[in-house]
Amino acid sequence: MRQFSRVLRTGRPTGAVRVGRVGRVLSGRLPKPLAAVRRGPLRAGAFPSTLHDQRMASLLGITLGITFGTCFLTGLVSHFMQHPPNWLSWPARPVWLYRVTQGLHVTTGLASVPLLLVKLWTVYPRLWEWPPVRSVAHALERLTIVPLITGSIFQLATGIANIAQWYRFHFFFTVTHYWVAWITIGALVVHIAAKLTTVRANVGRRRHERIPGTAVSAALERTAGGQDLEEQGNLGNGRDGAPPTGGLTRRGLAVATGTAAAVIVVTTAGQAVPALAPLDLLAPRRPDLGPQRLPVNRTARAARVAAVARDPGYRLEVVGTRRVGYNLAQLHALPSHTVRLPITCVEGWSADATWHGPRLRDLLDAALIPVDATVRVESLEARGGYRASEVRPAHARDPLTLLATGLNGADLELDHGYPARLIAPDRPGVLQTKWVHRVVML
Amino acid sequence: MNADADADDGADDGADADDGAGARTGSGAGLGVGGFALRVVLVAAGLAALGYGVDGLLTMPRATHPSNAAAWLIGGIVIHDALLVPGAMLVGFALSRLVRAPYRAVAQGALIVSGAVALMSLPLWRGYGGSVDNRSVNPLPYGRNLAIVLGAVWAGAALLMISRAVRVRRTGRTGRTGRTGRRDAPKAG
């Protein structure tokens, strides 16, 4: 708190006098509210558990910093794979890269549920801090907690709803989840800056030495950081996590929280990790459940292509320097290749499958499309954000990239993109366009 | 109440004194000049990211529906702070009355695990979401599966309780010296 005020104060090098004045305004004590108002959860000793302590909060904070950081970075990967800026060209290798980053994104997010809930419970007395606001700096610090907590809860709740395809909200999930991720991670970084000293004094083998200054200022630091935790009946950064009541110890709470996260990982990661598939009990997908033993994200009916995709007069058109058309018989007569590639959904599940059909690069060559050209693969869908996708040279020219006509030894089923679909390595599932009828050079 | 207020004042004054010393040396307490600079950079970067997110949310209203997004943002924290945490505290209070000491910690831990697992999978076992024409979404019998997982959790908890009971009986209620984390059992009895 005090450190934060100092940051704000000296963070503006606008002359010593002015800095001093700003500092006084920020850290000047605000008038205290009437003691008579201090009732219910506001009163001293309202939260007697010794587990509301700084060491617990610090350890959980570090863990959440790691899991939220992982979610943010893997989320950025997914966002920029789907919306690549011009300067960014994703590689087609390793084949499993997106599978790993997106599986990690969803699994880490789910495992963060117990971490976040226990962390918020640990610091809950702070919500009822007395006095509610000590100084302007204190008010500012409390203010940055609001986007941190709202954002964290929002990200986990909407993520859980989205992977179950449960849409009770009106906003478009991916866009909103992306922007709120920036809000959350920004507030988290500010929070880390504000709590750096508290964490250093509470974590690590030599933590006691890092309590700033002497024993006297150690006590002050403790009160500056955890005044109300202590005042309301807790230990602040207590040295002994054992409560006198016979309930969970600090170690016990950590074990329970870690167990919760582990149980969640073990019972959900099977939707992306083949070895864990038998334990996939609580994930929204099973990699082997669906038509042709493969899950489907968007059915032909939902995409409104069920009739047009079955039309026997279907023609595939490849438009480059030359325009080449194929009817169904011609498409199936093309040299066919068989590849084993995972399909990875942005919702976190992924599954290996065996695909066959012509290579995309052979089709591009036939239409005299140059090797450095980007192409657009278009679906029979009349509308929708995913009716077409861009394929840049790294993927378009990859020998593993097919315009697949078959899956696991049989013709594609309608829901998997009959008559032809794109399948490329290291690419989000929403960009593996189904029901393809045109490939156009850009 | 008076005594509290006095202690409070003392603490604040002390913190101020510490603050002044820190300001004189120009360093963040216990972090040195480098740590202080790090903090300034972190705060600036964090606020920039936060602002970028708010700006993005507001400039793409057709996708983000800012008022609906705000309702969900605020709704989440209100439900958590006003219902979830007080609810958990009520359960904790009930446990402290209903379950005796060597076993209470285990029951608390098992409840934490159960609650987190149930919440994480709530749309699945409640049957929310999915679509009628796509049976590969949410395809499993989640009610049964949740029962299996929670059954395993509580079976583990029961084993722990039994081992604690055996240990208490074998060692008696006194004379045990254990690590901090295990001291609760004999103390409470």
Image: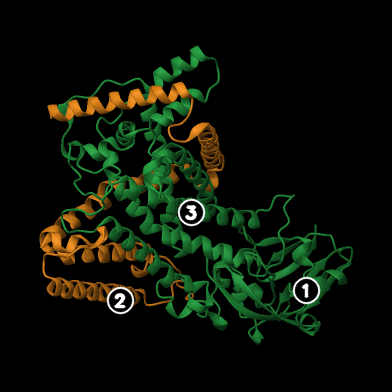
Would residue A68 be found to the left or right of residue B5 on screen?
A: right
Q: Which amino acid does label 2 sit on?
A: Ala
Which chain does the numbered disc 1 sit on?
A: A
Q: Where is residue A89 in the image (x, y as percent from the top left)?
A: 73, 56
Tell me the quarter of the picture where residue A144 sits. top left
Q: Which amino acid does label 1 sit on?
A: Pro
In front of the other: label 2 or label 3? 3
**Could you say whether the residue bearing mark 1 is in a helix, strand or loop?**
loop
Q: Which mark is on residue A399?
A: 1
Mark number for residue A362? none
Q: Is residue A215 above or below residue A175?
A: above
Q: Which chain is orange?
A: B
Give the mark toward the camera: 1 or 2.
2
Same-chain check, marks 2 and 3? no
Residue under numbered circle 2:
B152
Name the residue beneath numbered marker 3: A66
Q: Colour of chain A?
A: green
**Other residues around mark 3 within 10 Å, as few (<14) / some (14–19) / many (≥20):** some
Q: Which x, y percent locates residue A377?
A: 73, 64
Where does the N terminus of chain A fall, quadrant-wise?
A: top left
Q: Which of A67 and A355 is in front in this view?
A: A67
Marks 3/1 same chain:
yes
